Amino acid sequence: MKTPAMPTMDRVLFTEEEIRTRVREVAAEISERYRGGNLKMVGVLKGSVFFLTALARELTIPVKVDFLAISSFSNHSGAPGVVRIAKDLDDSIEGEDVLLVEDIVDTGFTARYLMQTMAGRGPNSIALCTMLDRSARRILPLRIDFRCFEIPDRFVIGCGLDYRQLYRNLNFIGVLKPD
Ligand code: IMP
Ligand code: MG
C-alpha cells in the first residue's frame, strides 16, 4: 500500500507560523550572544537539518556549519544510552564557539554524549540549542542554553522529526495518532 503524504494526526502541537515566530526569537538570542564571536553550528543528522537551516537563516551574524551523524543502540533491557558517532564533523572545532543544534532532547543520552565528546576537542565554548525539549523523560541532567519549545510526553513528527524516516518535511509539529 502507498504511504500517505499526510499521517493521521492526533493534533498539531505547533503550526508553521508559531514555529517561524519562535525560531526568530531564538535566533535573535543567539545572534546577540555570539556577536563578534566565532560561531560554528553543529547539526546532528538527519533530524536537526530542518531546524538548523531555519535558524541559521534568521541569524544576523556570520556562522560556519558542520554536521555529524550518530547511531544509537538500545541495550539488552531495551533502555537507551549507547551512542556512537557514525559520521564525524568535517573540520576541527578547536578554538571555535560551538553550538550543538538538536531537533529534540528526550532522555538526554544523545546530547550529553555529543556535548562531552566535543568539549574534549578544545573548542573556545560549547552550548546546546534544541528545537524541542521533552524534559519529562530526561534521564541524564543537561543544561539547555537555547530552546524553542517544551513538549508533553508524546511522540512527535515534522520539522525534521520522523516516524520510520517519514514526515521530516512536514512544516508543522504534530502528535502522531497511535495505530
Ligand atoms: P535522546 O538521546 O533520548 O535524548 O534522544 C534523542 C533522539 O531520539 C532525537 O535526536 C530523535 O532522533 C529521537 N526522538 C526522540 N523523541 C522523538 C520523537 O518524538 N519523534 C521523533 N524522534 C524522536
Ligand atoms: Mg536527532
Image (tube, helix red, strand yellow):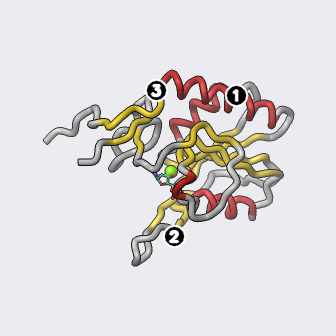
Amino acid on which the number 3 mark rests in the picture:
Thr
Q: Is residue 168 visible?
A: no
Asked whether 78 or 66 is in front, the reply is 78
Disc 1 vs disc 3: which is toward the camera? Answer: 3
Question: Mark 1 or 2 closer to N-term?
Answer: 1
Point 68% across, 49% down: residue: 144
Task: Measure the alpha-carbon separation of dots 3 and 2.
Answer: 33 Å
Amino acid on which the number 2 mark rests in the picture:
Val
Point 71% across, 46% down: residue: 145
Question: Mark 3 or 2 closer to N-term?
Answer: 3
Point 40% across, 78% down: residue: 76
Residue at which label 1 appears: 59
Give left or right: position of 114 versus 60. Answer: left
Residue 162 x, y percent position in the rendering:
39, 45
At mark 1, the secondary structure is loop
What crowding class fits label 3: few (fewer than 14 Cα within 10 Å), some (14-19), or many (20 or more)? few
